[in-house]
């Protein structure tokens, strides 16, 4: 069985960024990334593809160009974890050993939770910016709709980029408004949640846009079934008295965001918490029971906003802490829960929501973050793809240096960490 200093599961935003951070600190490390796909996706760009601002090609790059060249790329999918043996099992049954393991295979879109969805995606006006192939169909449908009913759905939390379901609505409405057809379109936002956005400071400026576009907000409504040909969708409605009921809605255009969960091989593993996500200390991002296992990105159970922005700050923390474990030292690097959601409220303006644990505002710029700004739109549409591909994935930690514990470093709690 090959054994690596560090084994990374997943070559997405998190896997590539953390590997680059590690190699920058110690170029001699033996690191391998297990990643089955040939293409790497810049998913934050899909909202813009769905609004005709980006071509989808701008959000895709060959995986070979994203995985750091000093790391070994194992083109396979992981299928199980054996933390007691310090091994990972691949889908072909072979095993890889490690001194430290980093688990970051992202999350799974659970389309099966919506009856009839798979059959009609990409047809009958049913679309989703959460799928690379479908984001262009969103734009096509937005352009062709001139009257009727548009529904935008949001599933129960957690989901990646919690603002993306409403971003799709704002940018679509902005187009319809500029075309002069918005008065002929009834717009509904149906969310499983009870609030428009999880960080209360951003709700009032977002409500201004909801009102400007005349969108109806329907809370506690979860999409459970779609009949594309009949142009009908069914929602489970949670009543205040604990009773549930079902409501039927007709649509001409339906933007679906599916429920999301940890990948099956993670859910069924000893690394998972009760909800299936990889257990991790919220600050050090280390597994509480296996001292040489870390997690970051969408699969991690830490209660931050699941975003690439969070990954940018998590990667250096995990890199430093992994090196501490490999060197037999206590952990010092701390993640503050930073995540960001650039809310594209209209073409040319973004509310740059940046916040940490507990909804604490953490703006990068010394400006009121609740104000929609052109500068933030420029950042999102012009600079972010290069910040992502050319800085974050390459280990350049511009404005992402980890915070450190000033006092006692965290002791190594688990014997597995010392057992090399
Ligand atoms: P991913 O980037 O999804 O990568 C996971 C990788 O793991 C994939 O390459 C996959 O192939 C691999 N993998 C899966 N299974 C296995 C396996 N069994 N073995 C090995 N490898 C495996 N974030 C922002 O910061 N700002 C935004 O504005 C924003 N907008 C978004 C809009 C949309 C529509 C979407 C979909 C996402 C958005 N995000 C945004 C979220 C951001 O894209 C994710 O949070 C980020 O990609 C998470 O990185 P990750 O590495 O955890 O997962």
Image (cartoon, rainbow, N blue to C red):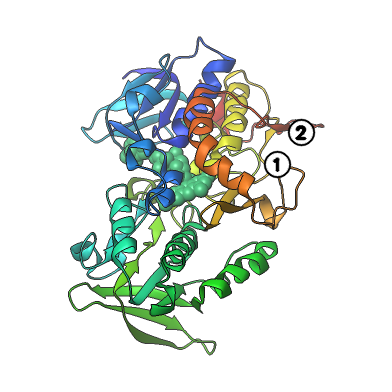
Instruction: Give neighbour class at mark 2: few <14, some 14-19, many 20+ (Cα, 10 Å).
Output: few
Given residues 407 and 414, the one toward you in this image is: 407
Q: Position of residue 64 (x, y in %)?
A: 33, 23
In the picture of the structure, the residue carrying the numbered disc 2 is 405
Q: Position of residue 24 (x, y in %)?
A: 56, 16
Q: Position of residue 272 (x, y in %)?
A: 45, 49
Quadrant housing residue 248? bottom left
The answer to whether residue 59 is above or below residue 185 is above
Image-based side of 109 in relation to 376, left or right:
left
Q: Are marks 2 and 1 in contact (CB under 8 Å)?
A: no
User: In the rendered view of the protein, which quadrant contains the N terminus?
Assistant: top left
Given residues 29 and 155, the one toward you in this image is: 155
* Residue 86 visible from this viewpoint: no
Q: Position of residue 53 (x, y in %)?
A: 42, 47
**Which quadrant of the picture is home to ligand 1?**
top left
The answer to whether residue 55 is above or below residue 229 is above
> Ligand 1 near label 1 (Cβ, under 8 Å)?
no
In the picture of the structure, the residue carrying the numbered disc 1 is 364
Image-based side of 186 in relation to 318, left or right:
left
The extreme right residue here reads: 407
**Picture residue at 52% right of the left edge, 11% below the top:** 27
Which numbered marker is on residue 223?
none
Given residues 157 and 153, the one toward you in this image is: 153
In this view, the mark in front (2 or 1): 1
Quadrant housing residue 31? top left
**Picture residue at 33% right of the left edge, 50% below the top:** 264
């Amino acid at each position: 069985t090959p054994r690596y200093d560090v084994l990374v599961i997943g070559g997405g935003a998190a896997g590539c960024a953390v590997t680059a951070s590690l190699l920058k600190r110690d170029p001699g490390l033996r690191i391998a990334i297990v990643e089955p796909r040939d293409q790497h996706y810049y998913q934050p760009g899909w909202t813009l593809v769905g609004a005709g601002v980006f071509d989808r090609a701008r959000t895709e790059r060959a995986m070979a160009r994203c995985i750091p060249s000093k790391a070994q790329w194992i083109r396979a999918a992981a299928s199980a974890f054996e933390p007691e043996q310090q091994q990972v099992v691949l889908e072909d049954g072979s095993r890889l050993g490690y001194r430290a393991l980093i688990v970051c295979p992202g999350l799974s879109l659970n389309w099966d939770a919506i009856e009839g969805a798979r059959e009609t995606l990409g047809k009958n006006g049913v679309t989703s910016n959460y799928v690379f192939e479908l984001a262009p169909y969103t734009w096509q449908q937005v352009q062709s709709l001139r009257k009727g009913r548009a529904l935008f759905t949001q599933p129960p939390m957690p989901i990646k980029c919690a603002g993306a379901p409403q971003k799709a609505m704002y940018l679509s409405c902005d187009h319809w408004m500029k075309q002069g057809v918005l008065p002929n379109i009834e717009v509904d936002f149906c969310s499983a949640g009870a609030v428009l956005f999880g960080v209360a400071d951003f709700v009032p400026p977002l409500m201004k846009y909801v009102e400007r576009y005349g969108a109806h907000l329907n809370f506690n409504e979860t999409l459970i079934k779609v009949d594309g040909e009949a142009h009908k969708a069914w929602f489970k409605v949670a009543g205040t008295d604990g009773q549930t009921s079902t409501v039927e809605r007709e649509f001409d255009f339906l933007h679906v965001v599916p429920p999301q969960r940890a990948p099956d091989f993670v859910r069924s593993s000893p690394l998972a918490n009760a909800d299936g996500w990889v257990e991790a200390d919220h600050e050090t991002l280390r597994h509480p029971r296996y001292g040489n296992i870390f997690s970051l990105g969408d699969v991690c159970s830490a209660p931050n906003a699941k975003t690439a922005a969070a990954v940018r700050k998590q990667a250096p923390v995990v890199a430093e802490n992994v090196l501490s474990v490999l060197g037999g030292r206590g952990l010092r690097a701390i993640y503050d829960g930073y995540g960001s959601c650039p809310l594209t409220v209209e073409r040319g303006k973004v509310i740059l929501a940046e916040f940490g644990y507990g909804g604490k505002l953490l703006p990068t710029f010394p400006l009121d973050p609740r104000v929609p700004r052109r500068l933030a739109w420029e950042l999102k549409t012009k600079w972010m793809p290069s910040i992502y591909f050319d800085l974050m994935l390459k280990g350049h930690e511009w404005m992402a240096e980890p915070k450190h514990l000033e006092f006692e470093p965290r002791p190594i709690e688990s014997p597995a960490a010392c057992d090399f």
